[in-house]
Amino acid sequence: MKKVLISLALVLLSMAAGAQQFHQDVVNAEMLRPSAHKGNLRKEIIIPQVNGYNVYKADLHTHTVYSDGQVLPKFRVAEAWLDGIDIMAVTEHVEYRPVEADMAVYLEQYADKRYEQEIASFKEGKRPDKDGKKVDLNTAVKKAQSAAKGYGITIIPGVEISRDAVKEGHFNALFTTDNNLVYDKDAYKSILNAKAQGALIQHNHPGWRRTEIGYNEFQKKIYGEGLVDGVEVVNSAEIYPGITDRCNNDGLYITANSDI
């Protein structure tokens, strides 16, 4: 009998503890809500001032469905806010936009004659040429800036110039004014187009798909002409410690980004 009473008491205690984890909805008393649920909370990363300057947390390499990301700009902004980010650069690929291509084909049944050339090009896996392009490459930036107003996050407009990883490499142009004017078939001219807008050029994941981190011929040219302003030393789970000394010696800024 004693064992039965003890078991019953444990069950009642368990039920009481479980009941404390929920509360009745204010409108519908027959609906329970978890008491511990506090909604989505921002991860605050507190960094003190350095030499009188405020320190802000930035992610200067991100993507959305407007290139090869998996979410809309408004979700990326909310995600950045939850992760404690203060500044986010939207850097869609100029040349590589597979998700946008999928959507263009999906929406073909809704598109009128004006977009047939673009859809045909996307189906062939090609980026429409400069004269035939009907999309606005600033769209993702604009949508992110609109969403960021509700979070207090600063959005840096940018774009990623994405060419052969071994022959040229990938470069973010940050603080662009019109992404539609960046593209050129010649990667060097694309970088010049971005610099003409006052953009900073960041060399992304310098060792990606390569066997070493030394300069290739294309990089010797653009570094030698002072066109590169900074290097992404950390890209998601990739870290390039050998780049740090080079950046310090050459006066280049260093970033750590998600490339998410």
Image: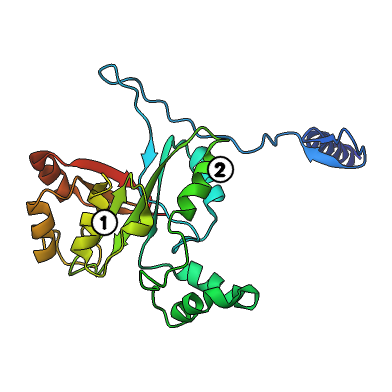
Residue 202 in view of the camera: no
Q: What is the x, y in percent for residue 253?
A: 21, 40
Residue type (three-letter) at the residue carrying disc 2? Ala
Q: What is the x, y in percent for residue 116?
A: 52, 79
Residue 38: name its quadrant: top right
Q: What is the x, y in percent for residue 8?
A: 88, 40
| Closer to us: 34 or 110 | 110
Question: Quick check: marks 1 and 2 in contact, CB under 8 Å?
Answer: no
Left or right, 95 with reference to 163: right
| Colouring | rainbow
The total of numbered circles placed on residues is: 2
Residue 36: name its quadrant: top right
- Marks 1 and 2, how far apart at CA: 26 Å
Residue type (three-letter) at the residue carrying disc 1? Phe
- Quarter the C terminus occupies: bottom left
Q: Residues within 10 Å of mark 1 (few under 14, many from 20)?
A: many
- Residue at x 30%, y 45% (from the top left corner): 256
Secondary structure at badge 2 equals: helix
| 192 lies above or below 81 | below
Residue 47 in view of the camera: yes
Left or right, 197 with reference to 22: left
Q: What is the x, y in percent for residue 222?
A: 13, 56
Which label number is shown at residue 147? 2
- Quarter the N terminus occupies: top right
**Quick one: label 1 or label 2, which is nearer the N terminus?**
2
- Residue at x 11%, y 53% (from the top left corner): 223
The residue beneath circle 1 is 171
| Closer to us: 87 or 5 | 87
Which label number is shown at residue 250? none
